[in-house]
Amino acid sequence: MSASKAKRAQVAERRSKAIAMVLAGVDYDTIADRLGYASRGAAHTDVDRALSANLTNLETEAGKLREIQFGRYQRLLAAVWPKALKGDLKAVEGAARLVDRIVRLWGLAEPERLDVNVDAQRLGDEILALLREQTSDGETDGDEGDEDAADLP
C-alpha cells in the first residue's frame, strides 16, 4: 500500500529541509534531532535517497532534452543534406557542423589527445639531481642538523 499524498508531502518537505541543513554544514546528529529522524544514520540514509532520486530525475530530464535537441538537428540536417550532396559548399559546411554537434550531443567524440613526448631518462636524471641538491643543501654537521629538522613544518 502506498503512502497518502499528505504523508508523501511531509516526507518530501523533511527531506528538503535535511538537504538544506547538510548544505549549510549541519551534522547528521543535529539534523536527526531537529527533524525527528530515529538516528543519525536514518537522517543520512534519507538524504542519500533524496539526492539519488533527484539525480535520477535530472538524468531523465537531461535525456529528454537531448532527444529533443537531436530531433532538431536531424530536421536541420535533412534540410541541408540534398544541397550538400549536390556540392553546395555552404551546405556542406553546415551539414558538417550539424554532424559535429550531434556527435558531441551523444558523447561520441573521442577526447583530444595531447602529444607529450618526454624523455623519461632525462626527466628521471633531472629529478634525481634536484633531490641530491636538496639533500646536500640541508646537510650540516653535528647537532645543528637536529635543530634544522625540528624547524620543519
Image (cartoon, helix red, strand yellow):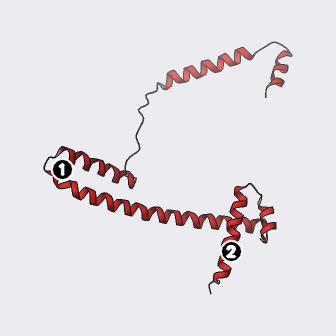
Residue drawn where x is 69% and y is 56% of the image: 23
Q: x and y percent of residue 143 in the render?
A: 86, 16
Determine the secondary structure under disc 2: helix
Q: x and y percent of residue 53 in the render?
A: 58, 67
Quadrant where the N terminus is found in the figure: bottom right
Picture quadrant of residue 134: top right
Residue type pointed to by label 2: Val
Residue drawn where x is 41% and y is 38% of the image: 113
Q: Callout 2 environment at 10 Å: few (<14), some (14 to 19), or many (20+)?
A: some
Q: Residue furthest left?
A: 86
What label sits on residue 11 in the rendered view?
2
Q: Callout 1 environment at 10 Å: few (<14), some (14 to 19), or many (20+)?
A: some
Instruction: Say whether disc 1 or disc 2 marks the residue closer to the N-terminus.
Output: 2
1 and 126: which is toward the camera? 1
Determine the secondary structure under disc 1: helix
Q: With respect to residue 140, does 22 lie above or below?
A: below
Q: With respect to residue 147, does 1 lie above or below?
A: below
Residue that badge 1 annotates: 84
Residue drawn where x is 82% and y is 23% of the image: 151
Q: Is residue 15 left or right of residue 31?
A: left
Picture quadrant of residue 133: top right
What label sits on residue 108 in the rendered view?
none
Q: x and y percent of residue 61 in the render?
A: 48, 65
Work out how far the residue at label 1 is from the one at label 2, CA to CA, in angstroms: 56 Å
Q: x and y percent of residue 102 in the render?
A: 34, 54
- Disc tally is 2
Q: Is residue 101 left or right of residue 152?
A: left
